Image (tube, rainbow, N blue to C red):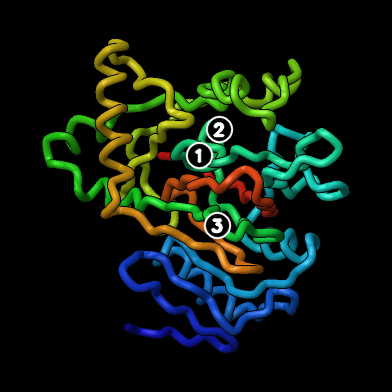
Amino acid sequence: MSIETLARLDIRPLPGSFAAEVVGLDLSQPLADDDFRRFHRAHLDHHVLVFRDQRITPEQQIAFSRRFGELQIHVLHQFHLKGHPEILIVSNIVENGQPVGLGDAGHFWHSDLSYVEKPSLGSMLLAQELPSVGGDTLFANQHAAWEALPPALQARVLHLKAEHSYLAKYEALRERSPWRPKLSDEQVARVLPSVHPVVRQHPETGRLGLFVSEHFTTRIVDLPEDESRALLAELFDHSTRPGLQYRHPWQPHDMVFWDNRSVTHLAAGCPPELRRRLHRTTIEGDKPF
């Protein structure tokens, strides 16, 4: 297994996956420009990077995230970290009868904020409190998913477009979840549906990848409803096959940085009585093409 050594850290491919772990780096300290450029390259190559043992403050997580671009503010302001709206609390913890964070985030496979005009470049999720059992996060490589499609299906979907909507499964989740507040009119107005290519080209690497997900993709534009539904079901099933996945078992103080242009992800869940809390920053990307 190759090990790429940067000035103050090692990037080690994780066996049997496309992901890699970063060891020997303290993100509470400034990162030199040369190291950042080489690290950026590694993120493009591996799609998912796992930073070990990051005991950093919210300000430091925000500052590091901003090196990649502007940060996106999640529509659920109820779960912003106090004083830091750039951070979304992902947590199943309930205090004084009120959830402290979004406890069912990642219930379905998705790419973060695919429903906005400029979907996310990437997300950084920092472990604050982990359960003793469960809580894994799964990632599926959408470049590999595209490359594994039969040529006839590639030709069929290459120029199609699909609608993405934050509200696609929101009410269904609200019915069984204490973590989905009723949205205000202002919040609904902030998450109007967007249309994106079914196959997008990565703006930095040029690689093609599928860009649909069971959580947010509602329909294929200009196809009859039954044909759209059947095609999406086929793509959803294909794009999340076990052979395309990396499963991340969280360790204390892990921070995982994934490329939303290259992967979709899913939360595996944990027993509800076990506490789980993570802090997420989300970086704005480009309009897909």
**Camera-side residue of 35 and 234:** 234
At label 3, which amino acid type do we have?
Val
How many other residues sit within 10 Å of disc 3, few (<14), some (14-19) or many (≥20)?
few
**Camera-side residue of 223 and 159:** 223
Q: Which residue is mark 2?
A: 117
Q: Do labels 3 and 1 touch, CB within 8 Å?
A: no
Vertical placement of 200 versus 144: above or below?
Answer: above
Vertical placement of 177 versus 16: above or below?
Answer: above
At label 1, which amino acid type do we have?
Lys
The tag earlier along the polypeptide, 2 or 1, is: 2
Q: Which residue is mark 3?
A: 133
The tag earlier along the polypeptide, 3 or 1, is: 3
| Residue depicted at 31% across the width and 19% down the height | 229
Q: Do labels 2 and 1 touch, CB within 8 Å?
A: yes
Left or right: where 41 falls relative to 275: left
Residue 161 is marked as none
